[in-house]
Image: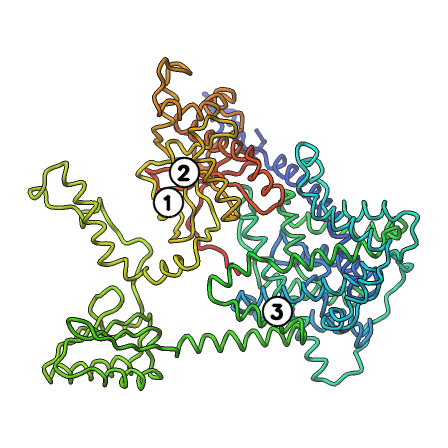
Amino acid sequence: MSQIEKSPPQPPHTPHHTEIPPEPRTPGLGKPVAQKAGRAARRDLSASIVVFLLAVPLSLGIALATGAPLQAGLVAAAVGGIVAGLLGGAPLQVSGAATGLLVVTADLVQRYGWRATCAITVLAGVTQLALGALRVARATLAISPAIVHGMLAGIGVTIAIGQLHVVLGGRPGSSALGNAAALPGQLAHPHVAALLIGAVTVAVLVGWGRLPGRAGRWARMVPAPLAAVLAATAVGMGTAVPRVELPSWRMPELPALPDASVPALATAVLTVTLVASMESLLSAVAVDRLAAERPDAPAGRAQLNRELAGQGVANAVSGLLGGLPVSGGAIRGSANVRAGAATRRATVLHGVWVLLCAGLLATALELIPLAALAALVMVVGVRMVSFAHIRHVQRHREFPVYAATLGGVVLFGVLQGVLTGIVIAVFLALRRLTHTRVTVTEEADGHRVRVSGQLTFLAVPRLTRALALVPAHTDVVIELCGSFMDHAAYEALQSWSATHRAHGGWVTLGGRSGRPLAEPAKAHSCRPWTPWRNHHCTRPAPDRAAAPKSSGSQLLGGVSAFQRHTAPLVREELARLAREGQRPTQLFLTCADSRLVTSMITSSGPGDLFTVRNVGNLMPPPGSDASCDSVGAAIEYAVEVLRVGSITVCGHSGCGAMGALLSSASPEEAEPTPLARWLRHGRPSLARMRRIGRLGRSEVALSGRPVTDDQERLALVNVMQQLDHLREHPCVARRVAEGSLALHGMYFHVGEAQAYVLDEATGRFCAVHGEPAPVTV
């Protein structure tokens, strides 16, 4: 106990001295502050080394691709780490040479020269600082994600095509179209040594994360870019290929304004500011969300306006020192979080290591072949075209915006491509707002007028023409399938309805659910989960049915309620899913317990989850008896055919399967029942719990409260054990090694309605809180 926790000494005249006992401390939460600080410092040191090893080859490659002096990439990495790390509002984000600005910087270097490019970088930094002071960072995130991802994809395509020329032993041109046109000739006459070095670099980059077994786990402690550059350097020893040339360090020349018109200069500064700010802010949000998943995440969220201002100062300093433009990067930031960084100290230390490396290891850096750096940047460019993003924007019907932005960036440039995407996005939004289809069909009992789309004043002429086709003295149902109707359309409908009724007709106005139409309100009041209690709305009256029949009547009553209220609302979305097929992104393996409503817990809807339920949420490992093929087949189908991106194993409180495992007298029964045979797959979990003991030896715990009893402890251990069983399946192991599949553990306490997510590094299940989610794009 520290001195401040001890009781103060009693005065000498006090006849009786009573010691005040120390306050009870929760295990793991009352450790001395110095011990926690020391552990955080060690984690920061380790993470800074990992990010440094990743940043050096990446910074050199970006500098090579832009045509800037190679030391400019190292200057940007050092300034981004130290300056942005100290001043920025996202403590775990790592800044450095901007991948997203590669094409823009290369164009500026070629058009105006290096000193002018440094001046533009300084001006862009000052602009970012002003925008941060004006607190406009959140407004920047209002740009459609389809535009942002299309911009990054277009930049990636341009990077990949240009650097392929360097890998083949040539020099890239000034435009993506020119580089694409020159590729056939370059492929016909490649430089063999450079091509071999590039091929080795790409092979190591792609295969490094897929190395199997213990060797693969040890190898993944070294960043793949560093391993690729080292392997390519070793292969290229003795060959006559261009290599890194670092000039001797000297005071940088002061930036000089380009000989260009004011509009041209303003366009260049605006482009650098826009792209650098967008990349930094989006990366800050992504890194913040990734860090929040850890139980030891720093308190508070990223301060985006401070981050924007910090990036501005870093860009101004980098430009003055002869460095590349700086921005936060998701690659470096995610590596920092996964390496265990606890504070901004890791980011700053990484910048210090880059500075020392540039001064002390220049000779070693000059052994690196340029083809290796070009191949590294080429792979980064290819990975900027994310098929996951393409599927996402396609699902939200924004692929035209994505494609227009990508094509505009490749054909015309970054700023022009972004403007093209904005124009297409605005056009599509207006089209969706104004595109309305009105159809009139004759049915056996009258006429039906169906209105699809938004009903605004622009659609009133089309609506009135359609209503004029309805004969007088007939029964009419007007079905409105849009989500918006303005006052002009409402008045037109009410006026026509009154006239039709006055001439002896009958009119029913309703929405998709068949409910009567009301005047447009100021706001809607729908909720994601309507309050309910024991489904009384679908239960029959007690005196109308006997007990055995009432449960079936309740089920039919629920189905009837679905057809009456919910089916009209989801029919359009289910029809789309029926046409396109299922494309879930997650597999959810949970217990068959009736109290677990997966769609409620995960706030998911049709097409979101591929769900597998069984008694005890068990995942039999490969080689189990044939009766387990159903679960294994579901896993294989989800991983190999549906290509889900994550698998979650979810246990729960009060699990009957866990209780049965604890109460079983012997491992085997003389005549095992089907249930007993199935529960044998839970015995490894029981054995694991007995090995770690009642206290858990820090291998399993709940955040915020102790584990209640053995049944809850076994449910938690079972989630961890079933994740291990999952990893034994070849298809799962391969996708996990590729980095395209993530495994998660979850525990749901039914009585508390509280979900917990497993942090496998600590064995702790952390409570998921109800704060609003961070901005995602």
Alpha carbons under labels 2 and 3: distance apart: 40 Å
Query: Label 2's element?
Result: strand
The residue that mark 3 highlights is 406
Residue 575 in sight: yes
Tell which circle, 2 or 3, labels the residue nearer the N-terminal end.
3
Q: Quadrant of residue 523?
A: bottom left
Horizontal arrangement in the rendering, residue 570 relative to residue 320 (left or right): left
Alpha carbons under labels 3 and 1: distance apart: 37 Å
Alpha carbons under labels 1 and 2: distance apart: 8 Å
168 or 187: nearer the eye? 187
Give x and y (percent) for residue 234: 85, 45
Residue under the image location 66 percent in, 75 percent down: 270
* Amino acid on which disc 3 is placed: Leu
Label 2: few (<14), some or many (≥20) within 10 Å? many
599 or 306: nearer the eye? 599
**Residues at badges 2 and 3 in contact (C-beta under 8 Å)?**
no
* Amino acid on which disc 1 is placed: Thr
Label 1: few (<14), some or many (≥20) within 10 Å? some
* Amino acid on which disc 2 is placed: Thr
Give x and y (percent) for residue 457: 33, 83
Give x and y (percent) for residue 645: 53, 48
Camera-side mark, 3 or 1: 3
Residue under the image location 56 percent in, 73 percent down: 421
> Where 427 sits versus 656, above or below?
below
Query: Label 3's element?
Result: helix
The residue that mark 2 highlights is 590
Horizontal arrangement in the rendering, residue 388 relative to residue 653 (left or right): right
* Image quarter hosting the N terminus: top right
Label disc, if present, on residue 598 of the rendered structure:
1
